[in-house]
Image (cartoon, grey):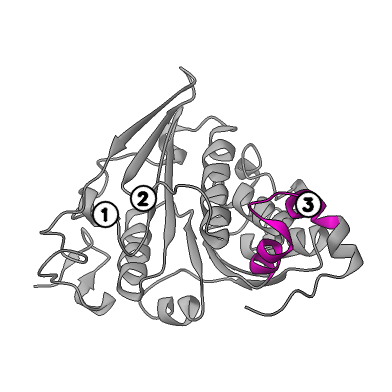
Amino acid sequence: MSGLNLDPVQLDRYSRHIIMDDVGPTGQQRLLDADVLVVGAGGLGAPVVQYLAAAGVGTLRIVDDDDVERSNLQRQIIHADADVGTPKAESARAYVERLNPDVDVRAHVAHLDQSNVDALLDGVDFVVDCSDNFSTRFLVNDACVLREIPFSHAAIYRFEGQAITVTPDSACYRCLFPEAPPAGTIPDCAEAGVLGVLPGTMGCVQATECVKALLGVGDLLAGRLLFYDAAAMSFEEVPVEANPGCPVCGDDPAIDSVADVDYAERCAVQS
């Protein structure tokens, strides 16, 4: 980490962080020195990008291959009507540049896959998985576990959300789900719908986990799956134990490279 180089404008911008004993100028400098990859600039990614940029995370890499659609605007709050048709990664970049000039925001208009995941993860301190499909979720998990990069995962459905943080010492996503469910068995938001404010809540949980991890404070959702029911306004935690038979983090892993996995079909180890 570099030395404390906060200028007067930064001391003013981040003053509510700096007066906290758990952050202070050293913690704020740590945020400014951090490099975070956000996978997806949609419903979950929007509040993640907002709050990480506002917090002063110095480098934000945003990867998304979709364009902004009008149906996104009910929940993807960093995009506006004028952005319809614009790549989401570019719209997110423009938003961050307006919000905080301290942030080096790097837009990648691409689908995260086996061909680019290594380059996108190079030098990253934390990953926030805001994807909306199983192939990307499993790829993020496998690549991060193999590189020992902590990450936050969340998913949303109608009124419900879930989140978990994976660290090098905790259970991983495959400990919960060794393989993806068969195609078509779980509807996406376009089929089932989603309450517009729900991804805001879950994305804020993910952003909080990221900031805590970068600062080294608090207790992460490692080994804990958090369920949120917006209709009942209730939270529930379920402990998640590391699976010794997990194909990526277990005692005898079958996956030692993302090249070993067929992410197009069940996200299973290639036979």
N-term mark: 3 or 1: 3
The disc label shown at residue 222, or none: 2
Q: What type is the residue that disc 2 sits on? A: Ala
Q: Nearer the viewer, mark 3 or mark 2?
A: 2
Name the residue: 74% across, 61% down. Answer: 96
Looking at the rendered structure, the secondary structure element under dot 2 is: loop
Q: Is residue 8 left or right of residue 122?
A: right
The disc label shown at residue 82, or none: 3
Q: Is residue 201 left or right of residue 129?
A: right
Q: What type is the residue that disc 3 sits on? A: Ala
Q: Residues within 10 Å of mark 1 (few under 14, many from 20)?
A: many
Q: Is there a contact, CB below 8 Å, between mark 3 and mark 1? A: no
- How far from the left and from the top, in percent, is residue 135? 32, 60
- How far from the left and from the top, in percent, is residue 214? 55, 62
Q: Is there a contact, CB below 8 Å, between mark 2 and mark 1? A: yes
Q: Quadrant of residue 268?
A: bottom left
Q: CA distance from mark 3 to mark 2?
A: 39 Å
Q: Is residue 177 visible?
A: no
Q: Is there a contact, CB below 8 Å, between mark 3 and mark 2? A: no
The residue beneath circle 1 is: 171
Q: Residues within 10 Å of mark 2 (few under 14, many from 20)?
A: many
Q: Residue furthest right?
A: 8
- How far from the left and from the top, in percent, is residue 182? 20, 49
Q: Is residue 230 left or right of residue 5?
A: left
